[in-house]
Amino acid sequence: MGLFKRAADIMEARVNKFLNSVEDPNEMLDLSYEKMLTGLQEVKRHLADVVTEQKHLENEIGQVQKDVQQYEDAARAALRSGREDLAKEALTRKQTALDHIVQMQEGLTRITEQVEKLKQTEKRFQDRINTFKTQKEVTKATYQAAQAQVKVSESMTGINKQLSGVGDTLKRAQDKTDETVARASAMDALMDEGVLDDTLDSRDNVTRELDQIRKSSAADEELEKLKKEMASTGGQN
């Protein structure tokens, strides 16, 4: 019986070790954090791609504007040489280039709007990650402290197996942690789609708008104060 009891104890210890490694809330929180960072990098890549297209279109518009000026100069030169037909052809090409510029400007406007939206999304995502990181570290520290307390208590009392209730409590806490992490991930997805407000911001819409107005007003007052100070000192530091 002693041999079978020893084998059962070893198997139980291995199973408990495996379950603890799988259900560790610290690992789950770190995994969620890494996924959020990956998502942020994806947003940054999209932003970089759109900005590249924006710059490319700006350069192309600049080149076509140079072509417009060259066509106009060519028309003048043709008229001076008595070649009205060539002057008209140059002016026709100028008009075509101007139409092309109008089309590209419309495209540039749309791309610029996309760039601004992506920048705002990146900022909101970064703020959310910073908040989650703080909460993650607090949760991990609390969990580690609880683990340490359990181990100390077990060592002092010497009744590790009799304290099965502690394991049940930790299991329930783990289940609650997993549920909360899953819910946070789902809420993040809904927030990214604009379906829900930021769950990390407890303010209602009216309070957020009032806070925004207050911040904007304070910035305006500070700006006017700074202008007056600089005016009174002649712009000197």
Image: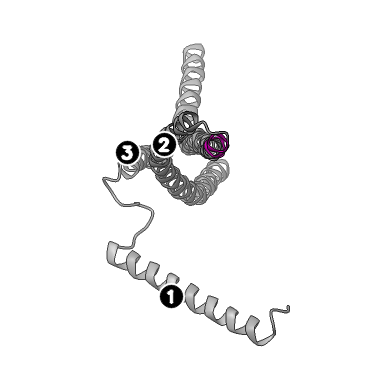
Q: Classify 21 as above or below 209.
A: above
According to the picture, the residue beneath numbered tag 3 turns out to be: 186
Numbered badge on residue 217: 1
Mark 3 or 1, nearer chain start: 3
Q: Classify 237 as above or below 205.
A: below
Q: Are marks 3 and 2 in contact (CB under 8 Å)?
A: no
Q: Nearer the viewer, mark 3 or mark 2?
A: 2
- Residue at mark 1 to residue at mark 2: CA–CA distance: 47 Å
Question: Mark 3: which amino acid?
Answer: Ala
Q: Which residue is located at x 49 percent, y 45 percent?
A: 143
Q: For residue 229, what is the image quadrant?
A: bottom right
Where are the magenta residues, as a range? 73-80
Q: How many marks?
A: 3
Instruction: Specify few, some or many for label 3: CA neighbours under 10 Å numbering under 14, 14-19, or 20 or more.
Output: few
Residue 199 in view in this figure: yes
> For this rendering, which residue is in front, 63 or 82?
82
According to the picture, the residue beneath numbered tag 2 turns out to be: 95
Q: Which residue is located at x 32 percent, y 67 percent?
A: 207
Question: Mark 1: which amino acid?
Answer: Ser
Residue 48 is one of the magenta-drawn residues: no
Mark 3 or 2, nearer chain start: 2
Q: Is residue 211 left or right of residue 205?
A: right
Magenta region, main secondary structure: helix
- Local secondary structure at mark 3: helix
**Which residue is outermost to the front?**
82
**Which residue is outermost to the bottom?**
232
- Local secondary structure at mark 1: helix
